[in-house]
Amino acid sequence: MSATPPATARRPENDWRLFARLLPYARQNKPVLVIVGILMLPLSFMGSVQPVLIGQAISFVRQEPQVWSWLAEETISQGMLILIMLLFASISLRLVLESGQGYLVQVVGQRMTSQIRTDLFERVTSLSMSFFDRTPVGKLITRLTSDVDALGEVFSTGAIGVITDLASILMITALMFLLQWKLALMLVLLLVPVSWVVVYFQKRFRIANYRAREELSKLNSFLQQNIAGMNVVQLFRRERYNAELFRSNNQTYVDAVDETIFLDSAVSATLEWVALVAIGGVLALGGREVMNEEMSFGLLASFILFAQRFFEPLRQFADKFTSIQAGLTAVERIAELLREPIAIEDSETAISGALDNQNQQTGEIRFENVWFGYKPDEFIIKNLSFTIRPGEKVALVGPTGAGKSSVIRLLCRLYEPQQGRILVDGIDIRELRQIELREHIGVILQDGFLFAGDVKSNISLGDNYSFDRIREAARQTSIDGFIEQLPNGYDTQLRERGTNLSGGQKQLLAFARAAIRDPKIMVLDEATASLDVGTEALIQEALDRLLQERTAIVIAHRLSTIRSVDRIFVLKRGELVESGSHDELLAIDGLYAGLHKLQKLGT
């Protein structure tokens, strides 16, 4: 499970810091954002001038003294026509500018979310296996999909529009103080309690929304586990039990969402109430001014419209409150993933091509006093030291949990040892570029994972190999016949995880996948366990060819398959307890001999 503290115990990050995290992505779209910023000024002015025009129309009809001097000289019909044309022009221009700004904002939002999603994926694929050991897959999927979509909602629902609305508030405030400072001051003072209410609910909503997102991650994790393990669910009749667990998790998520809905509704209701109070205040104070002939009726009408326009951005903010806060929560959660340290990185002093520049025979492996544990205080490998000479074939055997697969993971640098070092051709693997190290080592695992796509792409795995090279790799591993029997040969489409192939067929493709890369070191981790006797015999000759002049490490539980190796390393609880050939170890009559006798009894 993730080490993230519970949502109730955490303090949300400051909004401005969260927005600052988006600045690098905003800079990539600077030209479009500059245009959006320029459009704010005419938009704010067009929205602010409309109440003034309507107020002038009322004053003009009533022949009040506050009418503009150039307008007072016109007849009523001409003056009204001019004001109507100005009002129509301001409304039309505002609609055009809003449409243009809205389109540009959507474009920027989609670009930014696309860039963030790409960066997240690249970050996730760069993290070490220890991160994936403690992080549920469903939680990562939520970050890469739901959280990024929530971030996109910040833009699509008008986060930049909120900034435009704030510019409108400033423009309206300036105009109001120019026209009548008393009513302007009253409306501005009402912003103080409104701002306090918004900040209060914003803090509570952020915590509640973070909890809701965490519950959604747990729900997705539970769903992913059940789908991936559906055969176990059905075979052991856990459908009803798992459905009850899902119902419980789902209800917890609903309760968390209900809290965000309550807070969102509270903000909207409060802002509506304050807006009505503002209009009532304008009518009360402005009405008295009109009765005392200190203000025109037209100016009062303008301030009534100003009061509506003044609080309209806040009402819109209330409508967007949920999506904006969800977006900020998403930024916070995404930032946590982007801040996740990359535990295994290439050294700054790593020499490119260090393994390819060797003149002598390559493939030497040396472990020197290596200690390793998946948890810092629980060592799986203990003070392990050995040397495998170039071209030597070595088998790793031992009871379950002896650390055989951990040795392979350390050699491929999927994990880092806590102590000691591992050398390939005399070079510490921490001084090698990871891509070069893994090109040097070919690994065939017990479960050959296949991606959705055709057969040839599952052999090449994105590398630029010619079709002839792919076909030659299949021929070298004696699986070309099996591939050509598929409906479309090398172009046969495989389903996710290769579910339209048998376990043995998937494993055969893994052999070709390793052969095409011509590695100097071959690692076989129970590579033939999924093959039937006939298929294993078929591929054994290909394996012998594949391992010629290569260093090989073989992990096998069937000891009969490793008699021909040069040496056998026997591991027990992470320590090397025996080493030698098959016959030598039998003569010692130690752990290996005991395992061999047990297997003979079981046959």
Image (cartoon, rainbow, N blue to C red):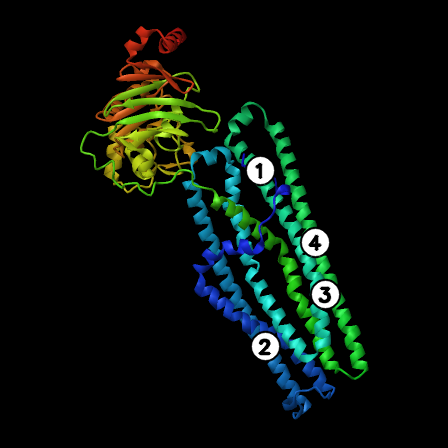
Q: Which residue is mark 4?
A: 265
In the picture, the disc for residue 218 is 1
Mark 4: few/some/many CA within 10 Å (<14, 14-19, 20+) = some
Q: Is residue 130 above or below residue 108?
A: above
- Tell me, yes or no, whether the two marked residues, 4 and 1, touch with CB atoms within 8 Å: no
- Quarter assignment of residue 226: top right
Which mark identifies residue 388? Answer: none
Mark 1 and mark 2 in contact (Cβ < 8 Å)? Answer: no
Q: Residue at x 65, y 38 (%)?
A: 252
Say if mark 2 contacts mark 3, CB within 8 Å. Answer: no
Crowdedness of circle 3 by 10 Å Cα count: few (<14), some, many (20+)?
many
- Amino acid type of the residue that numbered disc 1 sits on in the rendered structure: Lys
Q: Amino acid at mark 3?
A: Ala
Residue linked to disc 2: 90
Work out whether residue 438 or residue 320 is closer to the camera in this orientation and state it: 438
Discs 2/1, front: 1
Between 306 and 63, the one lying in front of the other is: 306
- Tell me the distance, in whole angstroms, between the alpha carbons under discs 1 and 3: 40 Å
Instruction: State the image quarter where residue 219 is shown.
Output: top right
* C-alpha separation, residue under disc 4 versus residue under disc 1: 26 Å
What is the number of callouts on the image? 4
Give the structural element (helix, strand or loop) at label 3. Answer: helix
Going by the numbered disc 4, the residue's amino acid type is Ser
Label 1: how many Cα within 10 Å (few below 14, some 14–19, many 20+): many
Mark-to-mark CA distance, 4 and 3? 15 Å
